Amino acid sequence: MKVIETLFNKVKFPSMVITLGYFDGIHLGHQRLISTTKKIAEKRHIKSGVFTFKTHPLSIIDPQKAPKLLLSDHKKIKIIESLGIDYMIYPDFTIDIMNEDPEKFVKHILVEKLNARHIVVGFNYRFGYKGVGTPDTLIKLGQKYNFDVTVINPVKIKNQIVSSTLIRDLIRKGEVELAKSYLGRAFSISGTVISGKGLGKKISIPTANIDIDDKIIIPSFGVYYTRVLVCGKKFNAITNVGNNPTFSNHPVRIESYLFEFDKEIYGEKIEIFFLKKIRQEMKFNSVKELVSQIKKDIKLVQKSLIFKE
């Protein structure tokens, strides 16, 4: 897959079927858009493309309302590539794009620049100045500029429309199992392993702490059953998200205890897949009580490793 990160280049694009959207999470609804795009492209014997943005539009339009994200840039690119798309057009969302007249956006960018022959969007897609452009706008402009438009109806699970907003809300509540059913995969967070306060080693339960990207959403504070990808291999683990209230002045951490793992991995990039919340974060009266509870958490997961990513 070719990733194009700016519209200001001399890349000559082939005829393409393009799907449009921000695609945060690349959930089941987004996957329907992308799979439809790929199928139409194959049928028409032309290339497929995803047009999205690095920056969430709300971070420019109304920064106070900009949401925490479900995916890092790297992960978004990786997933879209895995879905078999030929081109990912991935510029920053800018004030110029925000103020662009819908027809000018279609004519100058989608048609003249990206050579769109067919456009695929969701039922609620909006574009152009103040979001006045709609799927109906695209259909009318398609008749004028000679491209087809496919509008995808909402994907529903148990009468609930799949959306990034819904999934973020579930993750904030710690309902990672339910979030998985809408994402189509376990929610995960990646980060580089950094040194903590060394508390895990002191209590003989060493943990891998990761740096936290403040743009990415984190689950509600608590202890989770997780799987951790490190050095190309996955390990069962328990992961604590929180500020460890048993100890004072402890920063918010995401730290994982990996089962049957004893390597030093400082500086390594790991990915944590959240499968089930075990309990809320708790404050203990002593380190002894904390250690006792962590051991109970470990035994609970080891006895019931019935969850699968």
Image: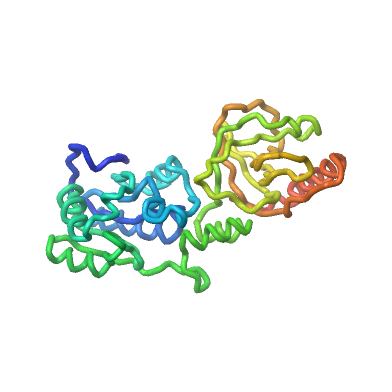
Q: Residue at x 70, y 38 (%)?
A: 257
Residue at the farthest bottom position: 159
Q: Is residue 102 above or below residue 289?
A: below
Q: Position of residue 15 (x, y in %)?
A: 18, 49
Q: Who's the residue at 30% across and 62% down the image?
A: 130
Q: How is the image coloured?
A: rainbow
Instruction: Using the image as rendered, state which of residue 101 and residue 198 is in the foreground.
Output: 101
Quarter holding residue 172:
bottom right
Q: Position of residue 193 (x, y in %)?
A: 60, 32
In the image, residue 273 sits, relative to residue 164, either above or below, namely above
Between 262 and 115, which is closer to the camera in this rendering?
115
Q: Would residue 118 be found to the left or right of residue 296 on screen? A: left
Residue at image position (79%, 43%) is 246
- In the rendered structure, the answer to whether residue 99 lies left or right of residue 194 reads left
Quadrant placement of the N terminus: top left
- Is residue 120 something that shows in the picture? no
Front residue of 164/63: it is 63
Q: Position of residue 221 (x, y in %)?
A: 67, 51
**Lateral position of residue 184 relative to residue 273, left or right:** left
Is residue 268 or residue 252 the one in the foreground? 252
Percent x, y for residue 215? 50, 45
Q: Is residue 113 left or right of residue 208?
A: left
